Image: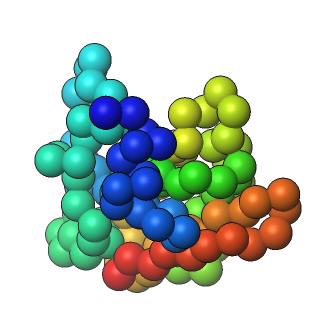
Amino acid sequence: MNIKTYLSNCAGKDPMIRVLPPGESIPEGISVCELDPITVSSWNFPGKEGLKATIIILADESEVELFVNGESYGRKNIGAGADNHAIFEVLYQPGIIEVISYHKNFEYGRAVLQ
């Protein structure tokens, strides 16, 4: 299954946020569509503070922006050539992550994990 099919079946308008728990890494040779069983939709990892967490964002728009506790980690292009996903690596800290998706530079959707 490709990402566009996956998104049309699961996501709707808002971006999807999937998190690889802190301290774990993406296995070699695995596609983003195959990550679902090893990722979670949570940002609650007691005792994992300071470890690298991988955040995978899937969206059907041109850009996404990641915020951790209100601090922007930048925008990434997920449109043409980026296969409708972006991967951010951040150090885990308790709180909230929020993703905003943009279409033609206007906000299109939001998703939040705690």
From this viewpoint, which residue is outermost toward the top?
29
Q: Is residue 83 above or below residue 92?
A: above
- Which residue appears at 54% of the width and 69% of the height? 13
Q: Is residue 50 shown above or below 47?
A: above
Q: Residue at x 24, y 36 (%)?
A: 34
Residue name at image x 27 percent, y 25 percent: 30
| Image vertical order of residue 3 relative to residue 42, above or below | above
Name the foreground residue: 51 vs 82.
82
Q: Position of residue 20 (x, y in %)?
A: 28, 50
Image location (x, y in percent) of residue 63: 70, 52
Residue 86 or 25: which is nearer the viewer? 86
Rendered-image quadrant of the N terminus? top left
Q: How is the rendered protein coloured?
A: rainbow
Locate residue 77 relative to residue 88 in the image: left or right.
right
Query: Where is residue 67, by image quadrant?
Result: bottom right
Q: Would residue 25 be seen by someone viewing this image from the given angle?
A: no
Number of on-image labels: 0
Residue 79 visible in rendering: yes
In the rendered image, which quarter is residue 41 located in?
bottom left
Task: Name the side, left or right, on which 55 lies relative to 82.
Answer: left
Q: Position of residue 75 (x, y in %)?
A: 71, 54
Q: Nearer the viewer, residue 58 or 55?
A: 58
The quarter of the rendered structure image containing the C terminus is: bottom left
Name the residue at 69% across, 33% down: 80
Left or right for 70, reference 35: right
